[in-house]
Image (spheres, rainbow, N blue to C red):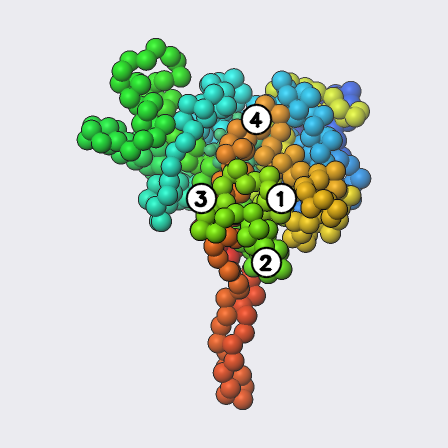
């Protein structure tokens, strides 16, 4: 499955056989949830597609008439939650059991992502909310900002490696000891390349900020304020240089790609629907004084802009399978056994394209959130997509309010200032006549942990 599973078949068979034997010795009292029948030893390893897995997971759930799906990849259990109610029951109501993160050997050990608390098991560091409040407020405004470019390059590896099942080293951790030169060990060479970028993403902005402080003319930012506090010797465990450096790195990686991806989706929706752009522009013109840009105080008066941003988060949800959770102890649910150590994925894509909640779910239609009588947002007509696009339970995205505000401001400013339309191209007809025609846009996802619509993919 996919490009990166190219290690020695002998290793697969030997270790797979061992895992299989150990597994089959257990006599569980309850069955595992339904799932596609796999092969002996390797389970569903070769059935899970390397791209757009969330669609396949949903198809399997539908075929098997289950909202909780079980897969097994060379001994690792994967549980996929296909609807909102199940995700709430497990990830929210039983969050003490479901707030771990799987230990991703490729990312955490080989690519150097141990700095990022978003991928660290629950309770190992300060909570993300606290850390976020320590470092909230990083400003990146330059066009082609080198920090953003660095974060994008480093994230390229992470958004591939964070998807369970992409690298066989997750199922067989011993493979991490295979030397990089060994035939078939391309994952080790990739990891080495990505490791360098990861370190640069964490170290370079940090070193620059320190230089600015030393120059005596630092730009105001929370990062700099906290560096100063550290230098002044503040007594607080949260204010160590290591925590601050890792926090900023984690925020770059978590906040940059995700928000830009949602913004790109908004643009795609508006390009496909000039009538939606026009309606939003009329609302902005009626509310915002000429010569001013909309700001967050205008949000209650601009429900259509809010509906556009919400619809983008639903239509092409940024992290379709969320960030994987890990189950810390054996659990039971709806008569099924959920084994400790299982990777738990909430299929946000399935929840946000559930036809019973969102009519014609594959259409970009902000009006689904608007009450036609009042013109106001009404989530009783279509559930607020925030219920699934920012994750669940104790690991819910701590940047969600900041993310939505940036998205809202970005899209409101764009709508207020630009008329955007699809590009045109000149083509020569067989008769020799040259005509202009509209270029149709590519709607495909660039698949990974974080997805991008192809037409503006940075990868
Ligand atoms: C549209 C933009 C964004 C989307 C769709 C998004 C979505 C998500 C999702 C689905 C998760 C996983 C939640 C779970 O495990 O259940 C997550 C985690 C996280 N997000 Fe976001 N996010 C966005 C923007 C941001 C921003 C702007 C920041 C920071 C400034 C941020 C910081 C984080 C962090 C630190 C985590 C890890 C939390 C933890 O593991 O405890 N995110 N995000």
CB under 8 Å between discs 4 and 1: no
| Viewer-proximal residue among 378 and 442 | 378
Q: Is residue 281 visible?
A: yes
- Residue for badge 2: 278
Q: Is mark 1 within 8 Å of ligand 1?
A: no
Q: CA distance from mark 1 to mark 3?
A: 34 Å
Instruction: Please state the horizontal and vertical placement of residue 49, each as a whole percent of the image.
Output: 61, 47
Q: CA distance from mark 1 to mark 2?
A: 14 Å
Instruction: Please state the horizontal and vertical placement of residue 176, each as a whole percent of the image.
Output: 45, 32
Mark 4 or 1, closer to the camera: 1
Is residue 212 placed above or below 360 in the rendered structure? Answer: above
Q: Which mark is residue 156?
A: 3
CB under 8 Å between discs 1 and 3: no
Asked whether, in this view, residue 321 is left or right of residue 149, the answer is right
Residue lying farthest to the front in this orientation: 289
Q: Is mark 4 within 8 Å of ligand 1?
A: yes
Residue drawn where x is 35% and y is 41% of the image: 147
* Mark 3 or mark 2: whose residue is earlier in sequence: 3
| Viewer-proximal residue among 448 and 129 | 129
Element on which disc 1 rests: helix
**Residue 78 found in image quarter:** top right
| Viewer-proximal residue among 223 and 21 | 223
Q: Which mark is residue 303?
A: 1
């Amino acid at each position: 499955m996919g490009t990166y599973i190219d290690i020695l078949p002998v290793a697969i068979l030997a270790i797979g056989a061992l895992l299989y034997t150990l597994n089959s010795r257990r006599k569980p009292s309850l069955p595992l949830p339904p799932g596609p029948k796999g092969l002996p030893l390797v389970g569903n390893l070769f059935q899970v597609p390397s791209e757009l897995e969330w669609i396949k997971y949903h198809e399997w759930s539908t075929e098997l008439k289950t909202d909780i799906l079980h897969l097994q990849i060379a001994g690792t259990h994967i549980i996929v939650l296909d609807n909102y109610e199940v995700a709430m029951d497990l990830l929210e109501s039983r969050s003490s059991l479901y707030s771990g993160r799987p230990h991703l050997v490729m990312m955490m050990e080989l690519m150097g992502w141990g700095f990022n608390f978003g991928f660290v098991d629950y309770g190992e560091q300060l909570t993300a909310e606290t850390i976020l409040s320590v470092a909230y407020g990083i400003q990146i405004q330059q066009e082609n900002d080198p920090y953003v470019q660095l974060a994008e390059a480093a994230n390229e590896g992470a958004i591939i490696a964070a998807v369970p099942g992409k690298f066989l080293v997750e199922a067989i951790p011993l493979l991490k000891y295979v030397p990089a030169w060994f035939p078939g060990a391309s994952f080790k060479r990739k990891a080495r390349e990505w490791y360098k970028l990861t370190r640069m993403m964490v170290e370079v902005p940090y070193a620059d900020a320190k230089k600015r402080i030393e120059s005596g003319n630092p730009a105001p930012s929370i990062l700099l304020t906290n560096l100063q506090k550290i230098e002044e010797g503040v007594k607080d465990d949260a204010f160590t240089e290591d925590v601050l450096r890792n926090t900023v790195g984690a925020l770059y990686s978590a906040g940059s790609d995700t928000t830009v991806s949602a913004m790109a989706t908004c643009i795609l929706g508006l390009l496909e629907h000039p009538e939606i752009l026009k309606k939003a522009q009329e609302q902005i013109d009626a509310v915002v004084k000429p010569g001013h840009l909309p700001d967050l105080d205008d949000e209650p008066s601009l429900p259509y802009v809010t509906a556009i941003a919400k619809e983008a988060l639903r239509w092409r949800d940024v992290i379709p399978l969320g960030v994987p959770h890990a189950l810390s102890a054996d659990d039971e649910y709806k008569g099924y056994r959920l084994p400790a150590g299982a990777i738990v994925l909430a299929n946000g894509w399935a929840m946000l394209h559930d036809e019973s909640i969102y009519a014609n779910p594959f259409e970009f239609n902000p009006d689904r959130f608007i009450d036609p009588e009042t013109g106001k947002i009404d989530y009783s007509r279509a559930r607020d997509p925030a219920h699934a696009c920012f994750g669940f339970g104790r690991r819910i995205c701590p940047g969600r309010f900041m993310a939505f505000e940036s998205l809202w401001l970005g899209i409101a400013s764009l709508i207020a200032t630009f008329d955007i339309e699809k590009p045109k191209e000149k083509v020569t007809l067989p008769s020799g006549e040259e005509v202009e025609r509209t270029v149709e846009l590519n709607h495909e996802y660039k698949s990974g942990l974080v997805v991008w619509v192809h037409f503006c993919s940075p990868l």
